[in-house]
């Protein structure tokens, strides 16, 4: 994540919120760095931030000193290219500035803005297939950056973290700014990957939070988050905070200036 960009399509309230966040974060440079051991056992330098601490007081948001998740080699993902289950809804998309490919995938293009689904939903089983660019450019947060932002507010980070270290709560499959994945299950650049996410939406009564949201995430069929209670809506460099919102909102796929591709994005609603 780290910054948001918006396109010229008509924005929903959620997309507008994403665009506002872009203005406030684009100028924020990393203010901390640390030498750490990455998931492959190599000593590397990581940039990050030390502005606000997460609950418990041990780590900052985007703390470069936080331990790097160990790299594991994922096996085949049984959901990769699989037919959606009965009752699932294949998402359709508002932003036509993305490149829609003949194989059914679609790719972020230069200055395209974030992608937003036509469909709105809350608690769900969500399936996403994505591929970071095969041609490696940049490092850290500048390499294959995007994000799956559920309800436009709760982000599972997309990033090329194949032998590319960054602050752990901003690496691929992190709950952005909140919790790193338990392990680094990334495939090589250009290879298709899967997220299978069980998302339980928060509940509000007026402005009062009565139930926080939670997520379980399998990255390439590797469990990396198990019923993790969210801290609030996604934020860069700052502590997440709860923001009251409707029960159903669109999915956002973030444009971060990298040609990340997606395909086979569907959800199955969960009654809760």
Image (cartoon, grey):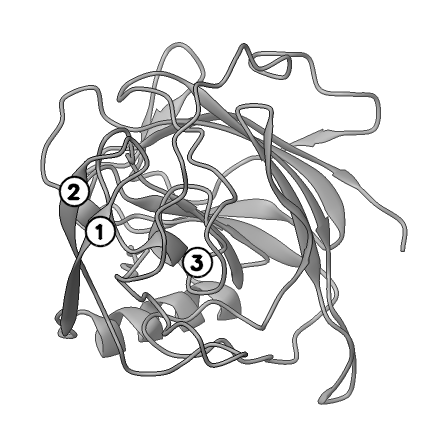
Dot 3: what SS? loop
What residue do we see at 10% from left, 33% from top?
A: 137
Q: Which residue is mark 2?
A: 43
* Callout 3–callout 2 Cβ contact below 8 Å: no
Residue at horizontal 18 percent and vertical 69 percent from the top: 26
Give the CA separation, mark 1 to mark 3.
20 Å
In this rendering, position of residue 55 left or right of residue 108: right
Q: Quadrant of the image for the N terminus?
A: bottom left
Frontmost of labels 3 and 2 is: 2
Q: Position of residue 117 (x, y in %)?
A: 54, 45
Determine the image quadrant of residue 235: bottom left
User: Mark 3 sits on what residue?
Assistant: 176
Quadrant assignment for the C terminus? bottom right
The Cα–Cα distance between marks 3 and 2, rounded to whole angstroms, is 23 Å
Viewer-side residue, 120 vs 71: 71
Q: Residue furthest right?
A: 271
Q: Residues within 10 Å of mark 2 (few under 14, many from 20)?
A: few
Q: Secondary structure at mark 1?
A: strand
Indicate which disc residue 244 carries.
none
Q: Residue at x 30, y 48 (%)?
A: 255
Which residue is denoted by mark 1 in the rendering?
36
- Answer whether labels 1 and 3 touch (C-beta < 8 Å): no
Q: How far across and down, in percent of the image, does residue 227 sit?
A: 72, 51
């Amino acid at each position: 994540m780290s910054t948001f960009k918006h396109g010229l399509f008509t924005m929903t309230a959620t997309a507008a919120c994403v665009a506002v966040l872009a203005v406030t974060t684009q100028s924020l440079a990393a203010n901390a760095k640390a030498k750490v051991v990455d998931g492959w056992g190599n000593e590397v330098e990581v940039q990050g931030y030390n502005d606000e601490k997460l609950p418990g007081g041990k780590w900052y948001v985007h703390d470069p000193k936080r331990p790097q998740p160990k790299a594991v080699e994922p096996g085949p993902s049984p959901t990769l290219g699989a037919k959606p289950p009965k009752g699932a809804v294949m998402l359709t998309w508002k932003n036509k500035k993305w490149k829609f490919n003949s194989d059914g995938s679609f790719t972020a293009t230069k200055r395209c803005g974030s992608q937003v689904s036509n469909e709105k939903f809350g608690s769900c089983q969500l399936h996403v297939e994505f591929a970071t660019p095969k041609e490696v450019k940049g490092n850290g947060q500048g390499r294959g950056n995007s994000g799956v932002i559920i309800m436009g507010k709760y982000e599972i980070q997309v990033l090329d973290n194949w032998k590319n270290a960054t602050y752990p709560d901003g690496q691929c499959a992190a709950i952005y700014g909140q919790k790193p994945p338990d392990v680094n299950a990334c495939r090589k650049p250009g290879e298709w990957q899967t997220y299978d996410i069980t998302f339980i939406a928060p509940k509000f009564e007026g402005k009062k939070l009565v139930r926080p949201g939670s997520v379980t995430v399998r990255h390439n069929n590797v469990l990396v988050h198990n019923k993790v209670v969210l801290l609030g809506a996604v934020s860069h460099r700052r502590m997440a905070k709860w923001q009251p919102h409707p029960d159903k909102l669109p999915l956002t796929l973030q444009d971060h200036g990298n040609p990340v591709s997606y395909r086979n994005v569907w959800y199955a609603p969960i009654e809760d």
